């Protein structure tokens, strides 16, 4: 399978590949949604910080390059606000992709 494009534009949402340059806005969005995410997301057991989030973003870049996973920021068109995160991961077997996502508590 080829990699998806770095950006996918829809009328109500834009998906943009996560990169390490997005560290501050990912930390801000996940921290603002922390109480909302904690019951459902294993990674949300401690308040997100730059130190805890940077390895995720580095992994996103490495997994994208290897074709293992494709992680996207979900952005609101117009102001580019991060409204969540979604991804496709090849961790459930040959020819299959797992879908993962979370949505900012305000959205």
Image (tube, rainbow, N blue to C red):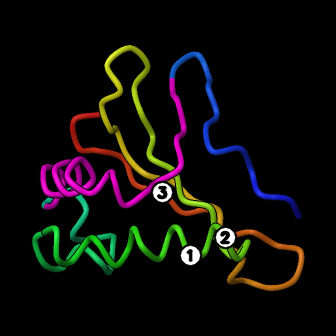
Instruction: Name the element at disc 1.
Output: helix
Q: Is 88 located above or below residue 15 in the figure?
A: below
> Which residue bears the numbered disc 3?
101
Gap in Å between the C-alphas at discs 1 and 2?
5 Å
Query: How far across and how far down the image is residue 47, in percent?
Result: 10, 70
Residue at left 43%, top 51%?
85
| Quadrant housing the C terminus | top left
Instruction: Name the element at disc 3.
Output: strand
Q: Is 21 located above or below residue 68 in the figure?
A: above
Instruction: Name the element at disc 2.
Output: helix
Q: Are marks 1 and 2 in contact (CB under 8 Å)?
A: yes
Is residue 78 toward the left or the right of residue 14 in the image?
Answer: left
Is residue 90 toward the left or the right of residue 104 in the image?
Answer: right
Q: Quadrant of residue 40?
A: bottom left
Q: Say which label, 1 or 3, has the lower sequence index.
A: 1
> Which residue bears the numbered disc 1?
62
Gap in Å between the C-alphas at discs 1 and 3?
19 Å
Q: Is 33 located above or below residue 55 in the figure?
A: above
Residue at left 21%, top 69%?
38
Q: Are marks 1 and 3 in contact (CB under 8 Å)?
A: no
Q: Is 84 located above or below residue 10 in the figure?
A: below
- Closer to us: mark 1 or mark 3? 1
- Type of secondary structure dominating the magenta stretch: helix
> Which residue bears the numbered disc 2?
65
Gap in Å between the C-alphas at discs 2 and 3?
20 Å
Q: Quadrant of residue 77?
A: top left
Query: How far across and how far down the image is residue 7, in percent?
Result: 61, 37
Query: How far across and how far down the image is residue 30, in percent?
Result: 22, 56
Q: Say which label, 2 or 3, has the lower sequence index.
A: 2
Residue at left 65%, top 62%?
88
Region of the chain picked out in magenta, as a range: 13-34
């Amino acid at each position: 399978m080829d990699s998806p494009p770095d950006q996918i534009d829809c009328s109500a949402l834009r998906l943009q590949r996560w990169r390490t340059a997005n560290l501050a806005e990912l930390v801000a969005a996940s921290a603002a949604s922390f109480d909302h995410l904690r019951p459902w997301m294993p990674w949300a057991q401690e308040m997100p910080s730059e130190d805890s989030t940077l390895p995720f973003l580095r992994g996103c870049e490495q997994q994208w390059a290897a074709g293992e996973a494709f992680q996207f920021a979900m952005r609101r068109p117009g102001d580019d606000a991060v409204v969540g995160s979604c991804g496709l991961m090849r961790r459930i077997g040959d020819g299959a992709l797992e879908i993962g996502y979370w949505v900012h508590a305000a959205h």
